[in-house]
Every structure is written in C-alpha cells, then in structure tokens.
Image: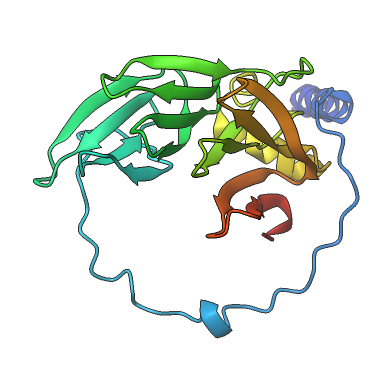
Amino acid sequence: MKIVLRTIGAATLLLLLYLAFWPVSVQPKSWHASNNTGYTGNFIANDILANLTMVDLDTRVGPEDADVGPDGMIYVASHAGEILKIGPDNSVKVFAQTYGRPLGIEFDQNGTLFVADAYRGLLSINRDGNVTLLANRTDDGSPILYADDLVVTSDGVVYFSDASTRFGAQANGGTLAASVLDLVEHSANGRVLKYDPATMQTTVFADGLTFANGVAVNEAEDAIFVVKTGDYRV
C-alpha cells in the first residue's frame, strides 16, 4: 500500500512540476475592469426577441453575421466556410465556399459581397459566387491573422477588424480558442484595417484595441465604431 501511495505522490508531484513549467504563449497584461452596473437604462431586461422565427440551416452551425443581398435573399456565413442563401420560404442553398472561417459579411452598392474570413483575410464574392482574396496582409507586410467583422462605405472602402495580431484564429485551433488566449493576455493588439478598392491597398486605420470585434459606420460616414470585446466597450 505504501508503494502505491508513494507512486501516486510521485506522479502527482511530477504532474504539478510539469504544469508549473509548461510553456504557454500567453503573456498576461495587468488590467482592472470597471464596476458592473448591471442591466439598466436602455439595457433593461425585455422580451423583444421572444417571438423569433428560427431558420433550420440543415445541420450547419456558426453563422456569425447576416446581410440582405441585392436579390432580397438573406445571406449568412457558416462554420464550415459556406456562405448560405436563405429564401423567403426559409430554403437554404450554398452560395459560395471560402474554405476558411467566414465571420462578418456585407454587400456593397454594386452587389459584391465582402467577407472577413478569420482564416484567410478579406475576401470578395461576386454574384456568381466566385471568391477572390483581396488581402491577407497589410501593405507594410503585417499578416492578417483574425479578420473578424467589416463595414463597406458608400464609396466602396472597406473597414474591417483584425481581432488579434498575437493569436491567429487558424494557428490557435479556431476562433474561440484564439479569442480566449487574446482576452486572457489582454495586450490590446487588435486593430481596424482599411481596404481601398481604388488602389487595392490595405492599411492600418486604428490599432491598440483589445480584441477588435464588431465594426460599424455612422450615417454621415465620418466615424467608425468598433466593439472592443476585451474592454466591453465601443
């Protein structure tokens, strides 16, 4: 019995030593969260979403974003890389395949669908479903590791978030795993990129953001709004 206990103790000690010195990629930064004010004001609990109609995606999962196309159909992205087209009768067809992990999607005024693909970068898809890679790195050579969401302005310029420049979605086992690593580290390395279709250049518009996530533009198109998930702020 003593031999068994010694063996278990030794194995436990070795396991603890292994975990203590196991190298990890995260280098946590100090951060103090503000007080949680709860669901008050505009955010008070309500039942607005109580009577939703659910659309069956036929075993597909993970739609991150949706947009209405020029044909009046609803387009959504799936976890398996498919861009799906949903008809008025809730029928679901495959419109395109990015072979990545499409997240944010939005049509421009010409009917081109732009996609922020977490694995591939910024993509465009024409009306025939043909996919074109527009950018997987910025013009200064910095790789786009986690394209997340985007917005297209009236002049065709695309602003899109690169959620983490430290933890790429594909390199770290997927969007969820990479986001957890980035949020734990909290090193504010996310950014917003700008793609200009006239010059086909991709430049850094804003950086130093803690997991740059959702992106929107105001009606006057003189301001970009970005969700900083790590700081739960816009």
Q: Nearer the viewer, residue 129 or 112?
A: 112
Q: How is the image coloured?
A: rainbow
If the image is split into quadrants, where does the C terminus sit? Answer: bottom right
**In screen coordinates, is 141 left or right of 92?**
right
In the depicted structure, whether residue 197 falls above or below residue 205? above
Residue 176, x across and y down, in percent: 57, 36
Q: Quadrant of residue 6?
A: top right
The residue shown at (22%, 53%) is 54
List the single residue furthest toward the left: 89
If the image is split into quadrants, where does the N terminus sit? Answer: top right
The residue shown at (23%, 69%) is 51
**In screen coordinates, is 149 left or right of 37?**
left
Q: Nearer the viewer, residue 218 or 79?
A: 218
List the single residue furthest toward the bottom: 41
Q: Report the number of discs.
A: 0
Residue 89, x across and y down, in percent: 8, 46
Q: Quadrant of residue 162?
A: top right
The residue shown at (57%, 48%) is 214
Q: Quadrant of residue 61?
A: top left
In the depicted structure, whether residue 234 falls above or below residue 50? above
Residue 204, x across and y down, in percent: 75, 32
In the depicted structure, whether residue 19 falls above or below residue 217? above
**In screen coordinates, is 44 left or right of 53?**
right
The residue shown at (33%, 38%) is 76
Residue 55, x across and y down, in percent: 20, 47
In the depicted structure, whether residue 184 falls above or below residue 101? below
